[in-house]
Amino acid sequence: MHKIRKCLFPAAGYGTRFLPVTKSMPKEMLPLVNKPLIQYGVEEAIEAGMNGMAIVTGRGKRALEDHFDISYELEHQIAGTDKEWLLTDIRRIIDQCTFSYTRQVEMKGLGHAILSGETLIGEEPFAVVLADDYCATEHGEEGVLTQMVKLYEKYRCSIVAIEEIPREDTRKYGVIAGDLEADNLYRVREMVEKPDPAVAPSNLAIIGRYILTPDIFDILRETPPGRGGEIQITDALMTQAKMGNVLAYKFKGRRFDCGSIEGFMEASNYNYEHIYKKKR
Ligand code: G1P
């Protein structure tokens, strides 16, 4: 029985919506207050019991590797000062996890990014986090990946996180339709990448949290380019869904689209009020 040990982070995108800041800095390093987006994703994965962080990067992403590495000079500088605690969390992460990296050499879509990560994952089920979907949970509530891992342990198939969106926004997301299997859980019948509102099968949108069974890699290899000429994870998942092997879970928590300036600013304000101020 396979436990989910690894989490894949596709992080090769250019972050063009945030230019010029993303000119020389990975968008995954944009901070909500004082912590980079990707660290929130890593913390969510750790909470869900994972310790293998597999990051698919690209050119100009070295800051990601430096972030998840020890900086001896810095630690030496602040040892014994009142700033020392600021590095406690990241230091614990580095001690607990292994980080592995591979590069997505060509930008051929999210499905292609995930397939590039196969070498880091191997033959086991794994989670995927899109770091620009930041998911906040209230104090005491379980993180979204923790909620999904529990479902995986029961159902043993691929699972996507979903939320209801306004119909006019279906063009921005993968959209599913399915049959209710349990509370907040659908057995997926149909999934379409970024459909027009007029033909979208529902207003249930996929957000950036997935649990995937490893057969997805063979399927991705066979999946032709779809929407935007890119290899879409949504299309590959549809192949699994045809066999009844995909669930969609309406998670508990609040999600911010940190891939957009508006969502990013909202998440920053939210974390400033709900996390940062409370720690002082
Ligand atoms: C990707 C997926 C899409 C999903 C979205 C969630 O799209 O292709 O199915 O709904 O992430 O954020 P992207 O936002 O990378 O265009």
Image (cartoon, rainbow, N blue to C red):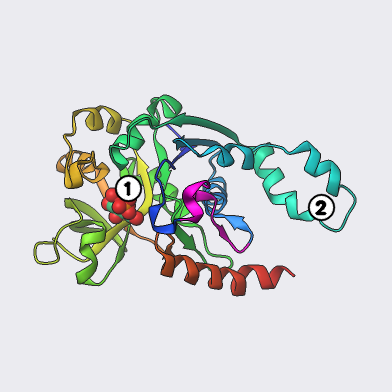
Residue 103: % across, % down: 43, 30
Q: 60 or 240, which lies in front? A: 60
All told, the count of numbered labels is 2
Q: Are marks 2 and 1 in contact (CB under 8 Å)?
A: no
> At numbered mark 1, what does the secondary structure look like: helix, strand or loop?
strand
Crowd band around label 1 with a 10 angstrom C-alpha radius: few (<14), some (14–19), many (20+): many
Residue drawn 50% across the image and 31% down it: 101
**Image quadrant where one finds the N terminus:** top left
- Report the span colored magenta: 20-33
- Mark 2 or 1 closer to N-term? 2
**Residue appearing at x 57%, y 50% in the figure:** 39
> Alpha-carbon distance for marks 2 and 1?
39 Å
In this rendering, is residue 192 above or below 205? above
Please name the residue that numbered disc 2 is placed on.
84
Q: Is residue 257 left or right of residue 218?
A: right
Relative image position of residue 243 (x, y in whole percent): 16, 39
